[in-house]
Amino acid sequence: MSVFGDGLDAAVQKAFTRPVPKSAPAQMRYLVKQLKGTKAVAQMLRVSQRTVERYVKDQIKKPRPDLAARLEREVKARWQPQIRAKAREKAATTGGIVIDTRARLGYTAPIGTTDQDRIRHLTVALPPRYAARLFEAQEAGATEQQLKEIAAEALKEVYFQDGGRRAGQLEEVRFTDIEHLEFDL
């Protein structure tokens, strides 16, 4: 499970204008239409082509939990691509992104300053360039650690250094023990 990747996806999904299909047969029909055939859907979901056909015809309605999760994930990943792209573009150019987190945050700073990690609850508006970096990294297949480093760098600049107005010698922000993480556009 990717806390950062899932959080970014959830933020973008809030921009959807139509609800994602709820029932398994409706989700299956949507995927068949998107992938132009039952064979491609069957391979993607790791089920038989006959199983896909039975969902499409409403002969099966309730999938196993593992199949239900794969089905939902694949539908959400393909749902309203233009709206998803517009939401990301807006965040990356004008709107920025808000990060709401409860995590252990500390920093590396010169000797004699307080750099003790502690659990903090922060809600911080990050500028568009950080939204762009997060989305670009996610699209490029960045690891959870790489996304965490981008977010830590953003928090360092925006929260701890207040855009260059304080904590000028701050070297690195540590972002660990994440209890809660949510993004909003």
Image (cartoon, rainbow, N blue to C red):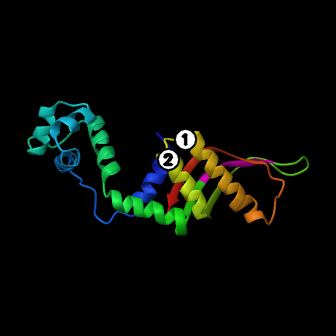
Looking at the rendered structure, the kind of residue marked 1 is: Glu
Residue 49 in magenta?
no
Residue 46 vs residue 113, the one in the foreground: 46
> Please, what secondary structure does the residue beneath circle 2 have?
helix
The answer, for residue 144, to whether it is visible in the render is yes
**Mark 2 crowdedness (10 Å alpha carbons): few <14, some 14-19, many ≥20:** some
Which residue in the structure is indicated by mark 2? 138
**Mark 1 crowdedness (10 Å alpha carbons): few <14, some 14-19, many ≥20:** some
Q: Give the left or right position of residue 58, taking residue 156 as reference.
A: left
Q: Residue at x 84, y 54 (%)?
A: 169
Residue extending furthest toward the bottom: 94
> Please, what secondary structure does the residue beneath circle 1 have?
helix
Looking at the rendered structure, the kind of residue marked 2 is: Gln
Q: Residue at x 51, y 58 (%)?
A: 183
Q: Residue at x 48, y 52 (%)?
A: 7
Quarter of image, res 163:
bottom right
Q: Residue at x 70, y 61 (%)?
A: 159
Which residue in the structure is indicated by mark 1? 144
- Whole-percent x and y of residue 89? 47, 62
Residue 107 in magenta?
yes
- Whole-percent x and y of residue 11? 45, 58
